[in-house]
Image: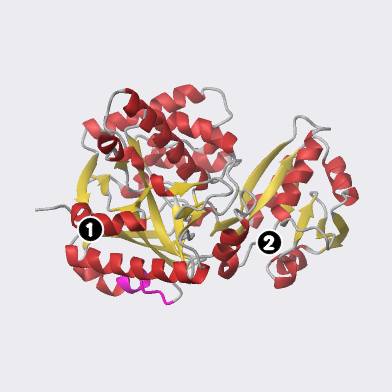
Amino acid sequence: MPTLNEQFASRLARLGIRIPEALLPKAGVDLAKWSVVACDQYTSDHAYWNTVDSLVGEAPSTLRITLPEIFLEQPGIDARISAIHGKMAEYLAQGILENRGEAITYIKRTTAHSGTREGLLFAMDLERYSYARDSKSLIRATEGTIVDRIPPRLAVRRAAPLELPHIMILVADPARELIEGLAAKVAEFEPAYDVELMQHGGHLQGWRISKAEQVEHIIAVLEKLLDATIAAQNSQEPLFFAMGDGNHSLATAKARWEETKTELATAGKSQEEILAHPARFALAEIVNIHSPGLMFEPIHRVVFTKDVAGLAAALKTSSEVATVTPIAEADLQALLVSPQGQDKAGFFNGQQYFAIAYQPEVKKLPPALVDELYARHKESDASARIDFIHGWEDNKKLAAEGAGCFFLPVIARETLIGWVQENGPLPRKSFSMGDAEEKRYYMEARRITV
């Protein structure tokens, strides 16, 4: 009997997706310790990751097979990566992870702040994805990709037998036909997991969709949405799957796939064998950009510097800046979530908040302008360092560590896909979907080696 991927091969190829064989923890594994938040969160918060480490202890956990980015620039990184690869091999050898076979996973995540967010887990075809600024691929970056951030992630993926996704990809489904209606059908699906997540992560549930008629329905809706996107964008090269979270993880998967193709070709493999390799695909959760449980949040900036006063002075004298006005914290928060705040930013020096208004002729978005200010400041303070922070409170508390904190608005979700199709990616780290604790928690894995 043909597999699901064989039955729907041509239709899946048009959509740039594959039905994955997900690996899940075996019965008896404590899922509350297994599942930890995406590695690109809490990147300056050692206390958070120390707490996670304490909670996990010696239990099987995705903490041991992923690399929290807080450690990327710390000593011993090579040893950490080697330990990750060793632990992956150990989990496979001990049967900690089990292959459940082909299935689309319907995911339901409930958090205190955003309510319920739903998604579908697919394997995305990296042949249909590019993060280049001028990309016309079906799957596309919505923000600028920081190429320098790929190599350390690539070092993890190169020798890894597994991938674990924290990638979320957006699709425009204003009628909510694709995902949101599945909640009423869960009795027809196979339960996969049900867990209360650590560190205020909320509740996570998953169901496997593996019957051909169920898969057929989902594919048919995706085809309908693709046809509508082609019509709306008036293009045979539409942006259909838009990156939401995990941009650099997907870019790393792409980079490794390009390396793998070269290695396989050098080894004498045929084109058919090369394109059948599992590294061609990357796991990602597809989410409706119109989902009521999907909160678009800004990604703020913190600049660690020995000269916060100099950073503030440079801000006030910047040629792009019209005014820097003292403002109450609550008023700044209200401004940046309003339509009038889309082209503004905020600054906190540890004592006072300021609203930043840019010159009307400046056409760049506020995240790019803050990044450029940082680059100029680094010329006078070589030790200065920028970090990208999810959450207002998490950002402002870093002022106590000797930093200038910038607060940014977020692009309206209704305009995102059209804006990127017309103008190319937004500035790097321009938006996030939910606060840090609402990010994807690792659960499923997939083999990326033969």
Q: Is residue 154 magenta?
A: no
The 10 Å Cα crowd at callout 1, few under 14, some 14 to 19, many 20 or more, is: some
Q: In the image, which disc is placed on residue 8?
A: 1
Q: Nearer the viewer, mark 2 or mark 1?
A: 1
User: In the visual, does 435 lie left or right of 337?
Assistant: left
* Residue drawn 33% across the image and 74% down it: 181
Residue 318 lies, in percent from the top left, at: 87, 49
Q: In the image, which disc is placed on residue 160?
A: none
Residue 138 lies, in percent from the top left, at: 44, 55
Q: Residue furthest bottom?
A: 175
Q: What element does badge 2 sit on?
A: loop
Q: Residue furthest left?
A: 1
Q: What element does badge 1 sit on?
A: loop
* Residue drawn 43% across the image and 31% down it: 156
**Image quarter hosting the C terminus:** top left
Front residue (pair 230, 26): 230
What residue range appears in magenta? 175-182
Q: Is residue 195 visible?
A: no
User: In the visual, does 20 lie left or right of 197?
Assistant: left
Q: Amino acid at mark 1?
A: Phe
* Residue drawn 27% across the image and 34% down it: 91
Applied colour scheme: secondary structure
Q: In the image, which disc is placed on residue 409?
A: 2
Front residue (pair 352, 240): 240
Q: CA–CA distance between discs 2 and 1?
A: 42 Å
Image height check: is 105 above or below 133? below
User: In the visual, does 443 lie left or right of 377?
Assistant: left
* Residue drawn 73% across the image and 42% down it: 303
The 10 Å Cα crowd at callout 2, few under 14, some 14 to 19, many 20 or more, is: many
Give the main secondary structure, helix, strand or loop, of the magenta stretch.
Answer: loop
- Considering only order in the chain, which callout, 1 or 2, is on the residue closer to the N terminus? 1
Q: Amino acid at mark 2?
A: Pro
